[in-house]
Image (spheres, rainbow, N blue to C red):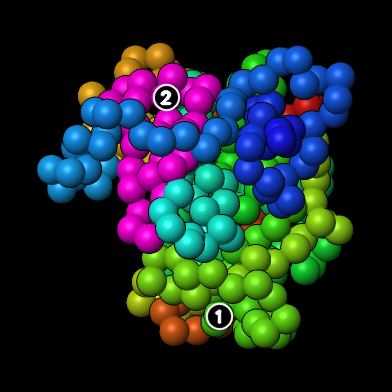
Amino acid sequence: MSYFYRVYGLNVKSEILIPELTILEEDKRDKIDVNICYKMMDADIRLMMLQGKKANYENKKMWFHIDNLATYCITNGNKIDIQLCENPDHQLVKVYILGSVLGMVLLQKNIVAIHGGGVVINDKGYVFTGDKGAGKSTLTTALRQCGYGFIADDVCSIKQGEINKIYPGFGYQKLCDDTMIKLGYTPNDYEPFRSDFNIKYIVPALDDFVNYEVPFEGIFELTVSDVESVEIKEITGIEKIQSLIKNIFRIEMLHYSGGINSLYFKKCADIAKSIKYYKLTRPKDVFSVNEQIEVIENIIYKDEIDKLEKLG
């Protein structure tokens, strides 16, 4: 049996049921961008695995193996083959598809995708990125609880054009224990899975999910430092391009497979020119989400006023 979905701007045909994804309309199922199939790995991959390799990344063929779960192979940006291990955690199988696997598809298709959560404020899309532990999920969840729209959890795929836009991801978030508790959730009420040595939970956000493209307005890169209060600084020029590229989802795969090509770099540069980019620094060991939201709302409001003034 096949299932049809729409995610990150892609039409997907899948042998795996993924209820978190938006169902693709029937009249659009004749144009499929990506096929997801159960399949035994090719002989070359099996040989490398016998030699002790757990992954190999080439430009048009990327594969990796997760012990006791599955082996994933992503080819030409349009094919995902999955060989399951015995008795895998099927929830975690899907988590890898929704994250790393589709991230590699986007790289192979030369689609720029930023590692971060997407929130819609005043009908415009903002991406919240940063290193692990910076507080991306905490902040995007808190913004959603404030009534703002939610468009993507961990991968913001960008549609480039006269006006760049963020494609919708899916209406669920992956949250860790401490985020759940700080923001008023009861972890036992949600389905857990183990990711990166941590327990996380799948939290529905369907009521707040924005299932359509929105203009891509800006990026907030979150950092943590020995500051007394939340600070914000606009990033411009070449540093803005460098910062954007640093936060591309699974950008390390391009380094493994020959580096960033000129077309992909130009796409990143064009996106950087069209958006605002801010570095937001929060104090260590302090729950400062409300202060962060106030700073973000003020800077967005100021940008809107500046635009109106420029228009006369």
Residue sitting at x 36%, y 21%: 60
In magenta stretch: residue 75:
yes
Give x and y (percent) for residue 63.
34, 37
**13 displayed left or right of 263:** right
The 10 Å Cα crowd at callout 2, few under 14, some 14 to 19, many 20 or more, is some
Q: Determine if residue 298 is in view.
A: no
Q: Is residue 169 left or right of residue 311?
A: left
Quadrant where the N terminus is found in the figure? top right
The answer to whether residue 305 is left or right of residue 153 is: right
Q: Please provide percent x and percent y for residue 94.
A: 57, 52
Q: Amino acid at mark 2?
A: Thr
Secondary structure of the residue carrying tag 1 is helix
The residue under the point 75% across, 63% down is: 204
Q: Alpha carbon of mark 2 to alpha carbon of mark 1: how far?
A: 35 Å
Magenta highlight: main SS: strand
For the residue pair 231 and 56, the one nearer the viewer reads as 56
Is disc 2 placed on a helix, strand or loop?
Answer: strand
Which amino acid type is marked by label 1?
Answer: Asp
> What residue is shown with label 2?
75
> 11 or 46: which is nearer to us?
46
Residue occupying image coordinates x 34% and y 15%: 262
Q: Is residue 171 magenta?
A: no
* Percent position of residue 157, x then y: 59, 35
Q: Is residue 223 above or below residue 11?
A: below
Q: Is residue 69 above or below residue 289?
A: above
The magenta segment: 56-83
Vertical arrangement, residue 110 with respect to residue 286, above or below:
above
Chain-order first, disc 2 or disc 1:
2
Mark 1 lies on residue: 177
